[in-house]
Image (spheres, rainbow, N blue to C red):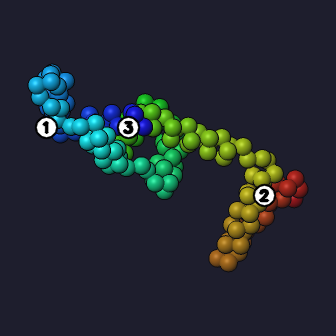
Amino acid sequence: MIFRLASALRHTSKSLQLAFSTASTVSFASHPPPFSCFGFILLLLIFSSTLARSTAAEVNFRVDTIYGLLTEGQSRGQIVQFGSKQWNITPRQVDEYIQRARIRLEEDAAMTRPSWIAEALGRARTYEQSAYKRGQTQVALNAIQLQAKLIGLEI
């Protein structure tokens, strides 16, 4: 939270920066500070509330995008540069998204052999049915042979 507040203060207008520098160089005995403590806290709250948090949908979109970049073989540096330019976020936040994307990659790679075979059989059946409907009997027969090989039968 303190980092976000400090970050918000760095992006203030020149007049506020001038007020801060004036307050630090002028004696408070002769000149009152530009803000009271309450005013300063209020100012910090206003600036911190303007720092928008990403929605869950935005986070998922960003993680999915980084997932794609990782599968394309992009390096961490390239992804950090992309995220910083594209979404105007810090490298630390991009690293968080990279970590989440890598977890998704590991989950996808953890597919068991029976699961993969079941999905492949489903696709082969779809190809068989589609080929049969279009009158492509050789393609349909090839799909049947593929299904047989997947379950361990030789025709």
Which tag, 2 or 1, sits closer to the chain's start?
1
Q: Which mark is residue 4?
A: 3
Secondary structure state at the residue bearing disc 3: helix
Which tag, 2 or 3, sits closer to the chain's start?
3
Vertical placement of 62 versus 75: above or below? Answer: below
Q: Which residue is painted at 87% across and 53% down in the image?
A: 152
Front residue of 77 and 91: 91
- Mark 2 Cα-neighbour bin, 10 Å: few <14, some 14–19, many ≥20: few
Three-letter code for the amino acid on which mark 3 is drawn:
Arg
Q: Which residue is painted at 56% across and 42% down in the image?
A: 101
User: Label 2 belongs to which residue?
Assistant: 118
Q: Which residue is painted at 78% across and 47% down in the image?
A: 112
Three-letter code for the amino acid on which mark 1 is drawn:
Ser
Mark 2 and mark 1: span between their CA atoms? 66 Å
Name the spot of residue 12 as percent of width and height, x first. 22, 39
User: Label 1 belongs to which residue?
Assistant: 15
Front residue of 29 and 53: 29
Name the spot of residue 8 as percent of width and height, x first. 30, 39
